[in-house]
Image (cartoon, coloured by chain):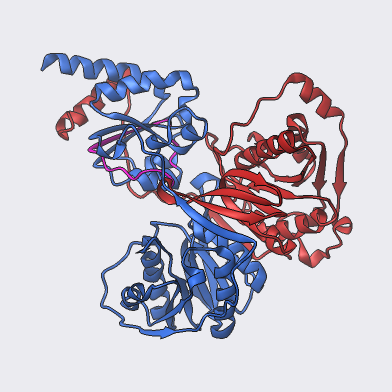
Chain colours: A blue, B red
């Protein structure tokens, strides 16, 4: 096996977790197959990042340019085309993140290198790269292979590979001159837009009632809100509820919303797409109510109730009020 | 402003019972309800809104067999002017890359300023077609788009990042925008609109019409080959609470008490 490239992802001065997750998986694959693991770092004034990455890779290629100050898929694509053409890694790992999905597909097409996206596992055996990915909203896993090629790209799902504490590799940091001659004219980064300041901080609530598609209609929101209050907590939700405008963005739990860790998370009518699960699976206690016995949410819950959520909400609220009354 | 919107006819699986078929490489489609891919629904709405604001046309395109006409009819009912379905037996098994190749050949012959599509599909979830299509056409792209504002030959876009953050970008047109869910609120269709849409013609383009060869499309033209499907193993085994709703409520209350949540 020839080398493995991991594209380091960083934003606003921070190396993002996905980078270390990919380096962990990359290290495992590289060690098993006697390959070299290279972290590729593009940016402006990112030498400190290079030092950090060197602990996790055999080599760090650092390429600095003012034009790489903020992520721009077109600038990244030009630079990676240059680096991948020169080093010819067998496998390049890129995060299946907002940056990664903007970059990887067009990079793959321009290089003619097969791409598999949103991978939750990657294997290498008998000179074949095999990936595992999910389909149908996480209800099915698929093992897939690439069309035979000299080189492959895989984008990796966030929070899939757990970062291990291992002996530092103390890789060599190699500075590479930038091949960029001019600014990318047709696509320009202007600024970051932070989320609007929210009225409710769901990350601070000890109890969260999370609602999903199963809530069916906006008119059902008050009923679950009341249950949340009775439980001494706040109402949160999965993405579809915010998309429909039924609850404001600050209530959204998941990769595109907030990461929460309450003492108790009650998931009502939430199927359990990984984006949501990512944001709540660290909760101390999870109880999920869903009509579908195969809902992926049951895979992370401590207790599961296969039932129409509306049949549970009323009795549970009454029970809680009853207990409160006894105190 | 001429807009092309690329849509996909997919099974609704969020609340459906999914069974892996006998081949082990696909799911059993019978009994599943098919509709426009959720992300594409928002792309369609965005296309129609831009047309309403700036004038021009909306062309809806899909790759799929005859059943996919239902999704194209929906597009027509919602405000698309024309609909094109790309289909040939040889297209069967196309992955995101093969799909993008087929789309690119057909789109090239149409006038457009903007191509819209969903950031991903609910079935295979590749999230690649829009971006690959842009690269094949040699035009810029943005995916996970949450807001589009047009100013002459340029667009100001909000792209979704993680944790509720967004980034503001400027792109030159023509371009491909792959949109996120929640970018707008898709409208309902009147019965009149649906009726009118039934009478419109859907143009069908086959392999010969694309100018591609057999080796460019279907499994032969794909990068990814699904070898096996299986039900994902659970991270932890939940304990199932059973009984009447009242009994379940009591059990939950007891759990909360013993775990010290109350």
Does the stretch in magenta take in A268? Answer: yes
Q: In the image, what residue occupies the spot 58% across and 35% down?
A: B184
The N terminus of chain B lies in quadrant: top right
Q: Residue furthest front?
A: B152
Q: Quadrant of residue B246?
A: top left
Which x, y percent locates residue A165? 26, 69
* Left or right, B161 with reference to A135: left
Residue A180 visible in the picture: yes
Judging depth in this view, the residue of A166 and B144 nearest the camera is: B144
Which x, y percent locates residue A24? 36, 69
Residue B119 visible in the picture: no
Judging depth in this view, the residue of A94 and A265 nearest the camera is: A94
Which x, y percent locates residue A273? 46, 43
The C terminus of chain B lies in quadrant: top left
Judging depth in this view, the residue of B246 and A27 nearest the camera is: A27
* Left or right, B251 with reference to A309: left
Q: Which residues are magenta?
A: A256-272
Magenta portion: prevailing SS class: loop
Q: Quadrant of residue B142?
A: bottom right
Does the stretch in magenta take in A174? Answer: no
Up the image or down, B243 lies above or below B204; here it is above
Up the image or down, B219 lies above or below A206; here it is below
Total residue callouts: 0
Q: In the image, what residue occupies the spot 50% across and 75% down?
A: A125
Q: In the image, what residue occupies the spot 36% across and 64% down?
A: A13
Judging depth in this view, the residue of B200 and A40 nearest the camera is: A40
Q: Residue furthest left?
A: A327
């Amino acid at each position: 096996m020839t080398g493995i490239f991991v594209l380091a992802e960083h934003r606003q001065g921070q190396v993002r977790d996905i980078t270390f997750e990919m380096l962990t998986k990359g290290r495992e694959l590289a060690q098993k197959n006697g390959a070299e693991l290279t972290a590729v770092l593009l940016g402006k004034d990112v030498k400190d990042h290079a030092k950090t990455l060197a602990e996790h890779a055999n080599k760090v290629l650092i390429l600095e340019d003012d034009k790489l100050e903020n992520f721009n898929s077109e600038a990244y694509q030009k630079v990676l085309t240059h680096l991948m053409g020169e080093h010819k890694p067998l496998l390049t790992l890129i995060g299946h993140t907002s940056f990664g999905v903007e970059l990887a597909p067009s990079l793959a097409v321009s290089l003619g290198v097969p791409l598999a996206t949103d991978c939750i596992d990657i294997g290498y055996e008998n000179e074949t790269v095999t990936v595992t990915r999910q389909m149908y909203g996480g209800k099915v896993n698929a093992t897939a292979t690439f069309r035979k090629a000299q080189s492959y790209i895989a984008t990796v799902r966030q929070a899939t590979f757990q970062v291990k504490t291992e002996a530092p590799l103390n890789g060599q940091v190699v500075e590479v001159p930038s091949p960029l001659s001019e600014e990318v004219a047709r696509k320009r980064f202007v600024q970051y837009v932070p989320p609007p300041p929210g009225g409710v901080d769901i990350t601070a609530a000890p109890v969260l009632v999370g609602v999903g598609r199963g809530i069916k209609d906006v008119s059902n929101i008050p009923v679950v809100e009341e249950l949340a209050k009775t439980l001494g907590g706040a109402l949160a939700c999965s993405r579809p509820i915010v998309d429909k405008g039924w609850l404001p963005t600050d209530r959204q739990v998941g990769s595109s919303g907030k990461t929460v860790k309450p003492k108790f998370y009650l998931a009502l009518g939430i199927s359990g797409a990984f984006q949501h699960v990512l944001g709540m699976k660290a909760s101390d206690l999870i109880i999920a109510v869903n009509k579908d016995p195969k809902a992926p949410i049951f895979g992370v819950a401590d207790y599961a109730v296969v039932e129409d959520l509306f049949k549970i909400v009323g009795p549970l609220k009454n029970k809680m009020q009853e207990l409160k009354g006894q105190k | 402003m001429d807009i092309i919107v690329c849509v996909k006819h997919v099974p609704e699986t969020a609340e459906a019972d999914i069974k892996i078929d006998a081949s082990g490489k696909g799911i059993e489609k019978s009994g599943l309800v098919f509709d426009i891919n959720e992300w594409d629904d928002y792309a369609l709405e965005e296309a129609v809104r831009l047309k309403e604001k700036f004038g021009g046309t909306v062309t809806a395109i899909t790759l799929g067999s005859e059943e996919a006409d239902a999704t194209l009819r929906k597009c027509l009912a919602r405000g698309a002017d024309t609909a094109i379905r790309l289909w040939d037996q040889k297209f069967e098994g196309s992955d995101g890359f093969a799909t993008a190749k087929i789309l690119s050949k057909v789109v090239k012959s149409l006038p457009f300023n903007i191509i819209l599509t969903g950031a991903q599909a609910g079935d295979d979830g590749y999230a690649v077609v829009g971006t690959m299509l842009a690269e094949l056409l040699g035009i810029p792209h943005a995916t996970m788009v949450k807001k589009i504002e047009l100013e002459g030959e340029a667009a100001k876009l909000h792209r979704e990042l993680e944790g509720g953050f967004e980034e503001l970008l400027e792109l030159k047109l023509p371009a491909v925008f792959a949109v996120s869910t929640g970018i707008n609120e898709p409208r309902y269709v009147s019965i009149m609109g649906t009726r009118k849409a039934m009478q419109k013609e859907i143009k069908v383009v086959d392999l010969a019409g694309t100018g591609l060869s057999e080796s460019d499309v279907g499994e032969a033209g794909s990068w990814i080959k699904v070898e096996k499907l299986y039900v994902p193993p659970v991270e932890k085994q939940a304990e199932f609470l059973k009984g009447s709703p009242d009994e379940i409520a009591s059990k939950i209350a007891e759990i909360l008490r013993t775990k010290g949540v109350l």
